[in-house]
Image (cartoon, grey):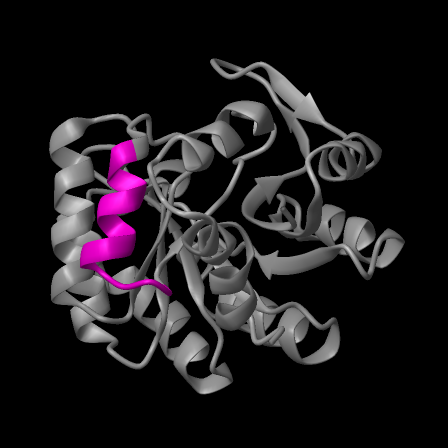
Amino acid sequence: MKKIDAHAHVGEFGGWANVSITPEELIKQMDDFEIEKTILCAQPNDLCLKTRDAYPERIIGLVYPNPYDGEKAVDEIYDYVQNKGFKGIKCNPLRHAYVADSEVMDPIMKAAEDLNIPVFMHSGHAPYSLPWSIGLLAERYPKVNLVMIHMGHGHGVYIDAALKMAKRYPNIYLEMSGMPMPSKIKEAYETIGHDRIMFGTDAPFHPAAVEAQKVLSSGLDEKAMEDVFYNNAAKLMKLI
């Protein structure tokens, strides 16, 4: 069953994670798991650009700004989208230490609205990236499609909140990497919308085999799995 990986990284990640993946290793993983395309981010952004340029048919680039850079971050978004062909924005409140709905995000969201591109945002870690804060950001920018990466991550209360926020705000999409409950993938598909839950690996932080198996064991039928694995991300990124 063909797939689009809605969230992955390249590069080296030291510290607590101590994981890494090269562009070549990512492509091999994609081949091994029938992943047709990967929505990719990296810091520095130039690493994502080099990977996309090396594999233009396989990689969809997201620009990864630090909102605290202010005008520089906004200029970077416009440059990478308008001049380099990137298709969206990645934001990580945990990495850059801001609350998801704080005012520092306003220039980023305004740029996304102007460019008509989605924003992918890490979720699941207090106090920065809680689903409720992401919901408030979605409420403030209803014209921006906002992908809640990890749909609350590993905390049951946060997973429940991710589902509730997505039910409340139709511009919230969910990506399920790192979220340990396969049943919640089915619940999201059936109660939030068939087009707003997507497969992702969060490479290199989680094994692709585990992330794919969560979809396969979620209880969804084959047509629904095709939506989660491929169709929903393809529609969001305007591939179909």
Residue 48 can be seen in this image:
yes
| Residue 20 vertical placement versus 147 (above, below) | above
Residue 100 can be seen in this image:
no
| Residue 154 vertical placement versus 191 (above, below) | above
Q: Which residue is drawn at 72% across and 39% down?
A: 30
> In screen coordinates, is 175 left or right of 185?
right
Q: Residue at x 37, y 65 (%)?
A: 195
**Residue 236, horizontal then vertical, whole percent:** 48, 69
State yes or no: residue 42 in magenta.
no
Dominant SS of magenta comes to helix
| Quarter assignment of residue 161 | top left
Q: Which residue is drawn at 20% across and 42% down?
A: 130
Residue 87 or 159: which is nearer the viewer? 159
> In screen coordinates, is 129 left or right of 147?
left
| Residue 132 vertical placement versus 235 (above, below) | above
> In screen coordinates, is 106 left or right of 84?
left
Can you name the residue that lies furthest to the right here? 54
| Quarter assignment of residue 25 | top right
**Residue 153, horizontal then vertical, whole percent:** 30, 33
Q: Quadrant of the C terminus?
A: bottom right
> In screen coordinates, is 100 left or right of 8?
left
Q: How many labels does the image show?
A: 0
State yes or no: residue 185 in magenta.
yes
**Residue 29, horizontal then vertical, whole percent:** 73, 32
**Residue 45, horizontal then vertical, whole percent:** 66, 52
Residue bounds of the magenta highlight: 183-195
Residue 71 or 39: which is nearer the viewer? 39
Q: Which residue is drawn at 27% across and 26% down?
A: 154
Residue 35 or 56: which is nearer the viewer? 35
